[in-house]
């Protein structure tokens, strides 16, 4: 079972990794959010330990992006922070954190919280699978199959596909797609979305034609393949 820890304090990060590995978990630590996102694009963990005070972007911003993405919106997240106020706890929990541990914390407490959260989420987790003609997409397993054959999608392409499938038959605005997948506003000159839609259509073959362009608004996945 893989656990990621995003914590800029090297001593805490190393101690937590050592403790987790001693209990049979696979653990990987990151000092910077950019390194964390690179790892997320390659492999998704079963749980994330997330510090609030970070360089580049704060932990609440990271949490909000995780919750906005279909592939990670159910990923268990424990916030780690030295900011031990009721307001910080409320903001963290309202943003989608599953648990909140204040520094300094004991390793035995941390392990107990992790085990409790994994037990709880294992019982609640439903593996939603989107099926659309010959296409089968599992956000939980992060897989996309066409006629039973895997389709190699980038992390952003996969998130786009999940969003379109989740709202099949409905137009998803450019602003929504840019916000949920990239954390951006609707910038008229930004062609990132269009490029990703084009490559996604190509990779899906004939099914790619089901991704419809609604001019001036956004994109829609047709109701039927």
Image (cartoon, rainbow, N blue to C red):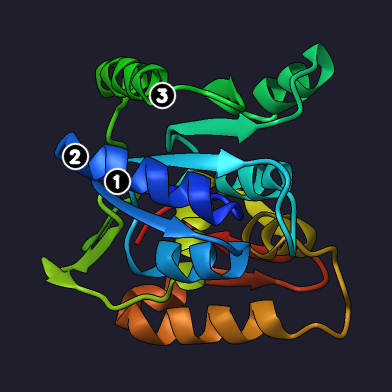
Q: Is residue 185 visible?
A: yes
Disc 3, SS: helix
Marks 2 and 3, how far apart in space? 13 Å
Q: Could you tell me if the residues under marks 1 and 3 are in contact, i.e. CB atoms within 8 Å?
A: no
**Image quadrant for the N terminus?**
top left
Q: State left or right for residue 41 relative to residue 80.
A: left
Out of 170 and 51, give the one closest to the viewer: 51
Please give the name of the residue rendered at 74% of the width and 64% of the height, measured from the top-left corner: 56
Q: Which residue is mark 1?
A: 18
Q: Residue 173's mark?
A: none
- Identify whether 101 is placed above or below 204: above
Q: Which residue is mark 3?
A: 110
Quarter of image, res 84: top right
Q: Which residue is mark 2?
A: 22
Q: Position of residue 169 (x, y in %)?
A: 54, 50
Q: Position of residue 142 (x, y in %)?
A: 30, 56
Please give the name of the residue rendered at 67% of the width and 65% of the height, measured from the top-left corner: 182
**Image quadrant for the C terminus?**
bottom left
Q: State left or right for residue 94 relative to residue 138.
A: right
Count neighbours of disc 3 (C-alpha within 10 A) and say few if under 14, some if 14 to 19, many if 20 or more: some
Marks 1 and 3, how far apart in space? 13 Å
Q: Position of residue 120 (x, y in %)?
A: 32, 15
Disc 2, SS: helix
Mark before the other along the chain sequence, 2 or 3: 2
Please give the name of the residue rendered at 52% of the width and 23% of the height, measured from the top-left corner: 105
Q: Could you tell me if the residues under marks 2 and 1 are in contact, i.e. CB atoms within 8 Å?
A: yes
Count neighbours of disc 1 (C-alpha within 10 A) and say few if under 14, some if 14 to 19, many if 20 or more: some
């Amino acid at each position: 079972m893989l656990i990621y820890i995003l914590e800029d304090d090297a001593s805490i990060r190393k101690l937590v990794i050592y403790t987790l590995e001693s209990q049979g978990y696979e653990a990987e630590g990151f000092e910077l959010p950019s390194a964390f996102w690179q790892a997320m694009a390659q492999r998704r963990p079963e749980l994330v330990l997330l510090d609030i005070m970070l360089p580049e972007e704060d932990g609440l911003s990271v949490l909000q992006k995780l919750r906005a993405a279909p592939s990670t919106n159910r990923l268990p997240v424990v916030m780690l922070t030295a900011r031990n106020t009721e307001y910080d706890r409320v903001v963290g929990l309202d943003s989608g954190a599953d648990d909140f541990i204040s520094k300094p914390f004991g390793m035995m407490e941390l392990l107990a919280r992790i085990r409790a959260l994994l037990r709880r989420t294992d019982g609640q987790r439903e593996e939603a699978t989107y099926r659309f003609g010959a296409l089968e997409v599992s956000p939980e397993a992060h897989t996309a199959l066409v006629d039973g054959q895997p389709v190699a999608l980038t992390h952003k392409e996969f998130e786009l596909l999940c969003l379109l499938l989740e709202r099949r038959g409905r137009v998803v605005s450019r602003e929504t797609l840019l916000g949920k997948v990239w954390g951006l506003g609707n910038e008229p000159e930004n062609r990132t979305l269009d490029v990703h839609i084009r490559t996604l259509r190509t990779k899906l073959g004939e099914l790619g034609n089901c991704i419809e362009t609604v001019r001036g608004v956004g994109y829609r996945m047709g109701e039927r393949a």
